[in-house]
Amino acid sequence: MSKTAIVTGAARGIGLATSKLFLGSGWQVVMLDRDGPELIAASKDLQNTSPIICDVSEPKEVQSAFEEIKLEAQNVNALVNNAGVADFGPMEETDFSRWRNVMQTNLDGVFLMSQTFIPLLKETNGSIVNIASISGLRASTLRVAYGTSKAAVIHLTKQQAAELGEFGVRANCVCPGPVRTKLAMAVHSQDIIDAYHDAIPLNRYGTEQEIAEVIVFLCSDKASYVTGQIVSVDGGFESTGVGLPALRQN
């Protein structure tokens, strides 16, 4: 019997790369995203996928997706909570509506999806992988809502691991560092790119594929004794603190 993974935010970026990697490993994939046209376009040429339009911040939509998946999927072996939004701005300019918009998807969505699908994951000794960010591990400017939401996802992962382990369900968290996505390249100036390269020991951005490789590993049987872990996939960025690029260049 083939395994089934649910991937949220699957229409593009890390979510799409993860979906494709699961497929390449012989999994069935349920691809969730609230952007219907983009989701349909991304999944139309992929075999063994089921696209479902779903806003993970809306309890009714999550429940509807659950009912559909419960009827159609033979089993659910992994849940990848990847859907997220970014909103960068000064703390004083982050009004409550902006704050809530970030929290609803980045944190509430992870909670709702995980809570709803726990019964199916218990049946398979399945795995949850939550996608946080390096911004949840180290503070930065203009990220009061985004960074706080991702820090909360990190702790939520630990709560999941502590409570669900006795049922054989594992929960881990992946924290990507700077990744060369279309969105990042559209908003990162050359100065920002140069600064990241200087601060990252590997001297480059990561790729969506590199993040996906870690996600799929954590969902696989190869990681059967790994739970409650926070894995930075960041080229060493989180480990270095304040870098000394001038010394490194010498």
Image: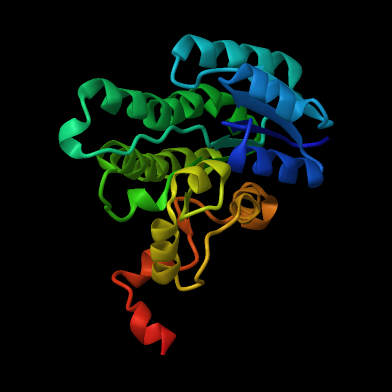
Give above or below for 24 relative to 79.
below
On the question of residue 75 being in view, the answer is no
Using the rendered view, name the quadrant where residue 222 is placed. Answer: bottom right
Q: Position of residue 111 (x, y in %)?
A: 42, 28
Q: Position of residue 179 (x, y in %)?
A: 52, 53
Question: Going 27% across and 52% down the picture, which residue do you hit?
Answer: 140
| Front residue of this view, candidates 198 and 236 | 198
The furthest residue to the bottom: 250
Question: Going 51% across and 21% down the picture, which residue do you hit?
Answer: 116
Q: Is residue 139 left or right of residue 47?
A: left
Quadrant where the C terminus lies? bottom left
Give above or below for 12 relative to 147.
above
Quadrant where the N terminus lies? top right
Q: Position of residue 38 (x, y in %)?
A: 65, 24
| Front residue of this view, candidates 125 and 200 | 200
Question: Going 37% across and 24% down the picture, which residue do you hit?
Answer: 104
On the question of residue 225 being in view, the answer is yes
Q: Is residue 121 left or right of residue 51?
A: left
Using the rendered view, name the quadrant where residue 238 is placed. Answer: bottom left
The furthest residue to the front: 190
Q: Is residue 220 left or right of residue 111?
A: right
